[in-house]
Each structure stands twice: as structure tokens, then as C-alpha cells.
Amino acid sequence: MARLMKSLKTPVQTLVKALNLGILSLGKCQMSTSDSVALNRMFTLKKKGMDYVGQVRVRSENPHARIEVFNESYFEEFDQPEALVRDYLTEKVLGRLLKDKELPEEVKDLIQEHIEYQELLTEKKETVLISSNDRDLDKIFERFNSEYFDNHIQAEIRWGRDVKSRNKSGFRYGSYDEQKRIIRIHPRLKQDFVPISVLELTIYHEMCHQYAPSYKRNGTWQSHHPEFKKKEREYKNFKEARKWEKHNWHRLLLPSEENSESVTA
């Protein structure tokens, strides 16, 4: 069975628009009278007939910019994680502020510094300095087979093939062919921004399908049943990998440059 992450039906580049954050209206600037540069600005988001009120704060100290939405129910309007929605909302509000001709240049400089700093921070988090051997499927498989399965898993493992098009309905991390005993891993997991723990969890997940096979209950096939989930959580970096997937899965919708064998359903 395959690990499949449900996705948006639009490219990542248009994710902000696709999220439909709402119609943004900015209030008046409120500059601080203190020596440090400070700006408070209220905003409203009109979405589905509701007005959600928020505030953006710009300060000299780090982080330079903070976004707050007073109506917590706003984030309940989205299927995506709150952190992801907040990131794109921050991008939208700060982008609008930068277009304000009346905004003091020192405030614009702080906003620009904040944007650049966040981009650098994200890049550092995503850059995983690992050698090609760290993504050797056979070595990871053999290590896990010994460490977690007492060498009882009998399967072949290989990379799948990436297609040069965006995924629109979902992203399949990997799959296990029960009849042929073949594990296929999506080659987009080769990319350096993908933590090694995510690749390892994918391999481990597919191995669990042989350890805890699917069974039929009440006329329905159960793939991720309690025994399967219990075994899957034994992977030492399970929570770390799942957390990364929750906040970054949408980045895997875009094709990588490498192609190999196709990932089957």
C-alpha cells in the first residue's frame, strides 16, 4: 500500500491565491513615539461574508514583523495547517505594506529585512548536508530490516520514476507491491531539502506493510490498522518526520530534475 498525502489541486506558485485568504483591507498606520522604529496596523480579512480582524506589528528587534488574527475561528476555515496559512497570510500582509507609498522608508527596510531573514532561516532549516550514501535505499532497508524486523522482511527496493509535471491530486511517497514484493520510493525524496528522516520513514512505512499485512474486516480492507500503526511508531524519528511532512508536503508536488522508474498505485 502506498503512503499518499492529500494535496491542493493547484500549483504551489499559486497557493496563496488558492487558499483564498480573504479580501485584505489595511487600517491606518499607528507609529510609535519611542526612539525605536515601531508600527502597529490593523487589518481586516473579508471571507465568506465574515470580517476577521487582525494586526501586523513591525519593530526594530527580531523578529521585525508579527501577524496576529484576533478571531481564532479564521484558521478553522482552512484544511491546511495553521502554521502554513499564517505564513502565507504574513507574506500577503507584508507585501501589501511594501506597496504603501506613505509608509516610512525605515519601516519598509525592516519589513524587507524580515522577509530576507525568514527566507534565509527557511533555507538553513531545509538544507540537509548528507552524502549520496545516506540515501542508499538498499543500505537503509538492510539496516531497518536488522534493527526493527529481525531480518524477516523479504522485498526488493528501488526508486520510482518522477514525471516532469505537477501533481494535482496528491503525492505518493512510496508504495509496496504485495504480489511482487517490491517497494518503490518516489525520487523527489532524493532532494536535499527533504530530511533523511522523511525518506527513512517512507521506507520503514512500506516495510511495515509486509510485517503487518492488510486484512478484510466487515467487507472493507484495512491497511493502516492498529497493529500496523503501532509498529510504524517504533521508528525512532517518527514524530520528527511526520511534523516535517505536515508543514512541507506541498513542496513535493513540483517535479524534480531526476527521473527513474514509475511509482505505481
Image: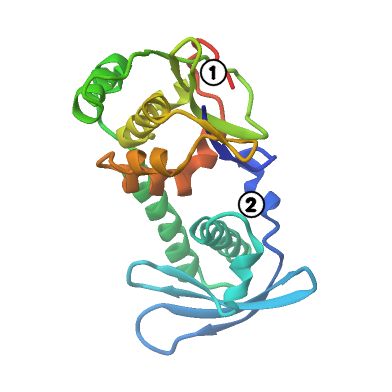
Amino acid marked by disc 1: Val
| Residue situated furthest bottom in the rendering | 33
Residue 22, above or below 18? below
Q: What is the quadrant of residue 45 in the picture?
A: bottom right
Q: Quadrant of the C terminus?
A: top right
Q: Which mark is residue 16?
A: 2
Label 1 SS? loop
Residue 66 is left or right of residue 95, and the answer is left
Residue 185, above or below 59? above
Residue 170 is left or right of residue 39, and the answer is right
Residue 141 is left or right of residue 107, and the answer is left
Name the residue beneath numbered marker 1.
263
Residue 215 point in image, percent of width and height: 52, 31
Report crowding for label 2: few under 14, some 14 to 19, many 20 or more residues within 10 A (C-alpha).
some
Indicate which disc, 1 or 2, sits on the residue closer to the N terminus: 2
CA separation, marks 1 and 2? 29 Å
Residue 34 point in image, percent of width and height: 38, 88
Residue 225 point in image, percent of width and height: 47, 41
Q: Residue at x 50, y 30 (%)?
A: 214
Q: Residue at x 42, y 49 (%)?
A: 119
| Residue situated furthest front in the rendering | 218
